[in-house]
Amino acid sequence: MPPDKPSPSRPLSSNSLWRMRSYLRPYVPRLVLIWLAAVAGIAASIALPLLIEQVVDGPVLHHEQGALLPLGLLALGVGAAEALLIFLRRWSQVGPVLGLETAIRDDLYEHLQRLPMGFHGEWQSGQLLSRATTDLSTIRRFLGFGMLFLVMNLIQLVTVTALLLHKHWPLGLLVAASAVPIALISLRFEKRYMRISRKVQDEQGDLATFVEESAIGVRTVKAFGRRHHVYDRYDDAALTVYSSSMDKVRLSARFFAFLEVIPNATLALVLLLGALAVGAGSLTLGTLVAFTTLMLQLVWPIASLGWILAMAQEAGTSADRVMEVMDTVPAISGGTTVLSEPRGHLRFEGVEFRFPGADRPVLRDVWLEVRPGETVAVVGATGSGKTTLTALVPRLLDPTAGRVTIDGHDVRDLTLPCLRSVVATAFEEPTLFSMSVRENLTLGRPDATDEEVEAAIRTAQAMFVHDLPWGLDTRIGEQGLSLSGGQRQRLALARAVLTRPRVLVLDDTLSALDVETEALVEEALRQVLRDATGIVVAHRASTVLLADRVALLRDGTITHVGRHHELLARVPEYRELLAQDADLDPSEGALR
Amino acid sequence: MTAAAPGTQTPDKPAADWRGVASEERDDLTEKVSMLLRERSRRLLGDLLRPYRRAIALLTGVIVVSNAAGLAIPYLVKVGIDAGIPPMLRGGGSGTLVTVVGVILAAALTQALTRQAFLRLSGRIGQSMLLELRRRVFDHFQRLSLSFHEKYTSGRVISRLTSDIEAIAELLQSGFDGLVTAVLTMFGTAALLLVLDVHLGLVALVPLPLLLLFTGWFRRRSAIVYRRTRETVALVIVHFVESMTGVRAVQAFRREPRNQEIFRGLNQDYREANASGMRLIAVFMPGIKLIGNITVGGVLLYGGWLALHGEVTVGVLAAFLLYLRQFYEPMQEISQFYNTLQSAGAALEKLSGVLEEEPSVPEPREPRPLPEPQGRVVFEGVRFAYVEEMPILPGLDLTIPAGQSVALVGATGAGKTTLAKLIARFYDPTAGRVLLDGVDLRDLDESTLRRAVVMVTQENFLFSGTVADNIRFGRPDASDREVREAAQAIGAHDFVTALPDGYDTEVGKRGGRMSAGQRQLVAFARAFLADPAVLILDEATSSLDVPSERLVQRALRTILADRTALIIAHRLSTVEIADRVLVMERGEIVEDGPPDRLIAASGRFAGLHRAWLESLS
């Protein structure tokens, strides 16, 4: 199974929904109004048939022409009042119901943005998306309508049952007893339905993951002509959803049929026993008629009860899924210290990092000092932990042992906004967002002036932006799909430079640039790095030359620190990493 | 985010352009266009329902029986009381009563069984349709050309395949059953009313035109409102997915507050769209109730007056009023499901639009076979332009003999990638043609072409699954040994075996647990396993460190030996292994020759090479 299953073993807690009540707090007066309107509405809807009965049994039957008009008009008035009350209830519901949904979605999004990279590495965004959309809509529908109907139905059930008991208690008791199997089966159904709907929801999340991958990786799929392969994977997941949904259909079909057969069978029984009672003289025919008529009013509330309970279950499942994310405590949260005048003195002190569950650390016992204004290049083989090392500085990850300090402060003591304005990173794989070039560039510093933006563009040799159809206002597609890799890297570099950070981290940012452009960018970067502390992950000698010193990362720890030429002369591993083919004959090179 | 935003690359379309996905971002649709869109959705729906024609006929029978059995029960109870009890009281047998009770039980059982059958059958039809729709849309998206995807963006693809499909699922799950029952009850009741008393029945149906007008108004309004709802939710989804996908950059650049602001805005728009939908229902539902209640009141007064004058019996009036209330109840139900119906309708409209899009790189009607591709690539007067006035390739003639390795060199924007994409047929030339072994690429079907031509880009997309799965993506039927050999040939074997589970290591979300260089090696092994006649490497080695690149380059000498290759690389070390170098400038080839000769000459390549040598020092 490819997609990551977010801890399915987590026990289901049915109180997740209850925990969401605080979102309704601002709407308490409105909710009172809604409930009043609902109850008054029920009263009106019960009163109307009674009034009609009055008219038919009274004036019409007894030929009292005078009473027809006032009673008839009263019936009209009650009918109009019922409609008005429904309007009032529905209209007032809009605010709280949507307010709740919108607020939870906002909070969920905010929470997700705070959760660290560790979390996002584990969770497919398809799973997150289905929580933010489908699940929240399910909750909204239940809290908005289902819950109200549930309570209204229960009121009706209780009232009618009480009336039945009042009319003839033995038969009334029979009717009340018929509720027992319904309640028992409903409970069992609830449990199974909950399990299966959670399964369907999770499987839909998996399906969404395939959709997402196929949409984002469409180039790769096309390049290899693997349409059928991708389709088959998707189809398997779609079939799984299909078969689980069919299980759900079968389960609820059985349940709903059962829910309807019980009241009807009870009705037949009441008729039979009622007739016997009439025969025995303990019941009048008129009461039996009234009794059965009332009983017929129970069928619909009971039948719809199942539907509403199913809805409640689904909402409960959805609430669990949402709360599962909300309950994840951000492993990385800011401290309280704010550096007023950061100098950018960066130190790694005995840093270790291991991914959760991994038996080997990615980094171990890393000691490195980068003084203000100094630039250190980090060189190491593929997979030696360079990117992890750089991610520790802006706290995209936290070390599992040791610490990283800036100007003597543990980065964990700094507030995140402070830390992340001191440190800026240009990633090798730049993420561009669906917005204008300008917005993408000013991501870290929205208040940058046009001159500053222009300077950053020049530093990164990203002048091509002026040739785009709308210049800086051109919206670059999602993921910057319409730009080349080199162009995207230069934008990412310009973005990092624009924040004027004290600590600039360049994670192999120049890899996709052509030689001429790279030379120009490096020239300009030298100026920027003169004023900032720099960490440069490099694969090429040309990039290494940006740095004052070089740290060689090997097997997760720093084995050598020194100047480029020194290391080149002294350390064979370093030579192997950085010397180009031009200097080394591959057939006799010092290869592994 | 809307069509009106500055910088949106979609220029205004003429009003008549509604075909395909063009109508998605327009909300000023004319009546005629909306009708055409509805027609298109109906066609798709009909198409999806066609295989189930028989099952639907059966379903109709089942639901009629179920409803008849359900409606018969109250009537049977009356019969039991009126005809079954009096004989008993007179001391006669209880035979009639027992029979009636037996019939009631039988009716209840019939209703339960037919209802279960109905729910299962309709559920199966619904789920099968859903599956078919999922398959069709997914497959169609995969068929559509890259140029479509670049414009349409993956967020919208995702939203079509998730929330739109779910809207239809929602209708099938909750709406369908209630809707059918409601409609049947309504017609049944109307017939009953007329049978009971034609005169009173006609009076009771007087408000019907008003009802129809009101419903018509509601339908029109809600069509607009729910369209808006779906649009706003799509924007929420796009933003959500994008910020979760790019969360690293979001956090590193403290983008959270601004993102939150944008999200709040989009979420608010969605809320308002939803609110207008709910308010619309808040007006419509009580409106129907009002019409219903007033009719009941009117019939009560008029019928009462008639009864007083002996023109109808009291019994008929009582029954009439009872049924009249039943006539308006289902209307409420229908409107309950109306929004579900509307969202499903809007979703269907968009999905049918997607299905209508034609791949701009279409499959040939009569594909030419290419049994053993050799890899001879010829460009004949090829012109290519994204925008007509600014051709990327103004007119290119080029012949690459089978087996030759060609390096493309030139500044960014010189047209190198475009040339590569034309060979991979991600695009078709605006004019001229590209030939593989003498066959126009447009005459090759997709599987033939992809077996012959593979392109590795700097975007090394890894799918969820294991490392082996990802390598095997190049040739799904490859054995474990072949996967391993491919990794060995590329020099990826060492790092893969060092991973916690070796080849069975899960790569994590989009390969997030691997470094860029490692991902590139996997992508490389994948291409090697595919074993194409023509291999295109577009900046494919840029993220590799020197030792890895050296490994790859050594492997490349073997890999490229017996196949045509087109290498785009900024690192001239990669270029040196090529048989031939093409220097491009503004879409034209300005230098062409073996690397040694070009270095020895004094052209641009010689200059580049010198600069590169200097950069290594």
Image (cartoon, rainbow, N blue to C red):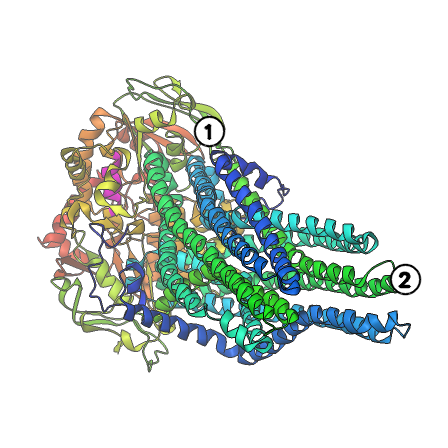
Amino acid found under the numbered disc labelled 1: Pro
Q: Which residue is mark 2?
A: A280
Q: Nearer the viewer, residue B561 or B605?
A: B605
Secondary structure of the residue carrying tag 2 is helix
- Taking the spot 61% from the left edge, 53% from the top edge, the residue there is A46
Picture coordinates of residue B461 (x, y %)?
39, 53
Question: How many other residues sit within 10 Å of disc 1, few (<14), some (14-19) or many (≥20)?
Answer: many
Q: Which residue is mark 1?
A: A399
Q: Is residue B235 above or below residue B100?
A: above
Q: Nearer the viewer, residue B356 or B303?
A: B303
Q: Can residue A169 be seen? A: yes
Residue A134 covered by magenta stretch: no
Picture coordinates of residue A145 (x, y %)?
53, 50
Q: Are marks 1 and 2 on the same chain?
A: yes
Picture coordinates of residue A255 (x, y %)?
68, 60
**Is residue A286 found left or right of A98 in the rendered image?**
right
Q: Nearer the viewer, mark 1 or mark 2?
A: 2
